[in-house]
Amino acid sequence: TSARAQDAGRFAFSPVGVATDSTVHVPEGYTWDILVKWGDKLVSDAHDFSHEAGVPISSADKVFGENTDGMELFAVGDKQVIAVNSEYVNPKINLPHTEDGTPQTADDVRMLQNFQGVTVMEVEEGENGWRVVVDSPFNRRITHNTEMAISGPAAGHDLLKTEADPTGTRSLGTFNNCGAGKTPWGTYLTCEENFNGYFGSTDPAIELPEDFKRYGIAAESRYSYEKFDDRFDISKNINEPRRAGYIVEIDPSDPASTPVKRSALGRFKHENAACALAPNGQVIVYMGDDERGEFLYKFVSSGTYTPGASTDGLLDNGTLYVAKFADDGTGEWMALTPETTGMSLEEISIFTRMAASKVEATTMDRPEWVAVNPVAVEAYCALTNNKNRGVKPNAGGDDTAVNGPNPREKNNYGQIVRWYPENDDHADTKFKWDLYVMAGNPDVHSGTPYAGSDNVHAGNMFNSPDGMMFDTSGLLWIQTDGNYKNEGDFAGMGNNQMLVGDPVTGQIERFMTVPYGSEVTGITWSTDRRTLFVGIQHPAAPFPDGEGKLARSSVIAVKRADNALIG
Ligand code: FEO
Ligand code: CA
Ligand code: CA
Ligand code: CA
């Protein structure tokens, strides 16, 4: 046993070193294996994935989607079902017949639309490890064209009505599904992040409404859907983007169910949705808006959750709050109401960013995942980085000056803020806060704030915390999506990684490194907690299929060699 392992405290592993190679590393005594790769079949009549041609359009919504992100595992009877996001696509890879990945036909657009969204899949552990149960009745793809219901204050509002949906209550598709969450009643929450990139204008002279600017919706789109699919053409369908940017609830136990866009949870670039329960049973959903200078939110339900009772309306009726941090370590959740914002409830749920600016919420360094500690009344948010504070003021004109939880001017490294709700009640409007960690590089920036906080040292350096999840023992798993060049400010950090933090002592140790080029995002456990599933997004070749093959985003299964619990 090494000195570091003896030092391990609550950590049941010896930390791994940094890596710069193209594979996954886990601690001694642990193993990893692939569960599923982009393009793997969910149904047996899908085409096999080909390294030359991918899969044909006819199979694009019958295979595991591209660029895996947030995920959750659900026990459905004695079955295990994973719901997992596919955040975005690489058009150049998927449309090899095009010069630069720009769609040339409606089929090209449909291809890109079908590789994204959400995959629901049954998984099972056998003698040869974990596998997807092909043809399971639970297997389902939810794409950019799947029918959705819209609920909550925005449902039926004029701003959500289109020619195809004059009711403003039925939309198609969920977009840029980033992080995720799980409700206390066992449904999946998928979070629409950079939805703006899917909409564009065939009329380049279009005059953009003010709200489009705040949300980054522009005449030029990321994927050029608008050229072949009018629904994404804002010169023809000005309200369509206002039907995106929500949190969507999906019932993984019912493949015929219609996903529901929960407008009461606000509209912004949603990262994830971390649920908590107040002592009286009110449901709290914490949510980050991942953009420089945007905000941290929470929703508090009006009604209370009782196991087994109806959950109707719990995510439709409630109050949205935004965080205001004071420099003295206290803070307050500011309610977004008609009284505090001068906006209607409908407008608050559609133009949430503007409502939050009106109450002078604290501008943040890109709020990514929130994680709620199951064994202490506290929550954490990864503030991933803010590379251009002062260089590129955000579209809303908010003051992005340094402030309490965002203390560094040029923030290359990121930090994790933690808050303790007053009265041990997540529904309380008051809290105290501190920084759990400031990432940094003590080798390069010794003696300055860029060295990081005291719990950062040469053996656990990392940058850009992003995904976060607590295990049942109250250890915080931290995933990074940062600079992996291993040079300059980032020398000694290597590839992206997953670390484990002890909230009590502050100790942080590196559990895993991921292949060069990839980020690690998405984490969930098997029902017996003897397997940890982890997502590897946008790896570079040769991961996972070898030299000369396409790189494929994958979910891996991590186990202990002695099959003991993980976390
Ligand atoms: Fe999709 Fe903010 O990460
Ligand atoms: Ca993320
Ligand atoms: Ca990120
Ligand atoms: Ca990503």
Image (cartoon, grey):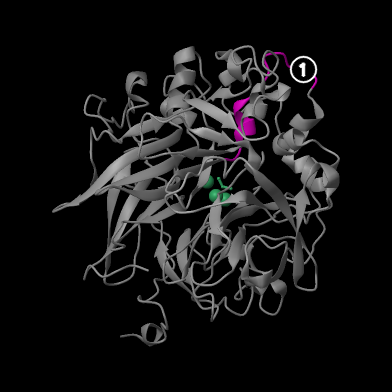
**Residue 433, position as x, y percentages in the image:** 69, 70
Q: Is residue 298 above or below residue 136?
A: below
| Location of residue 186 in the rendering, given as x and y in whole percent from the top left corner | 42, 48
Q: Please indicate, yes or no, whether residue 345 appears anywhere in the rendered image.
A: yes
Q: Is residue 81 left or right of residue 339?
A: left
Q: Where is residue 400 shown, x and y percent of the image?
A: 80, 54
Report the quarter where the C terminus lies.
Answer: bottom left
Is ligand 1 within 8 Å of the beta carbon of the residue shown at mark 1? Answer: no
Q: Which image quadrant is residue 122 in? A: top left
Residue at image mark 1: 206
Does residue 308 appear to the left or right of 435 in the view shown? left
458 vs 414: above or below: below
Residue 196 colored in magenta in the image: yes
- Residue type pointed to by label 1: Ile
For this rendering, which residue is in front, 29 or 242? 242
Disc 1 element: loop
Residue 394 in view: no
Residue found 52% across the figure and 66% down from its top: 493
Which residues fall within the magenta stretch?
A: 192-207
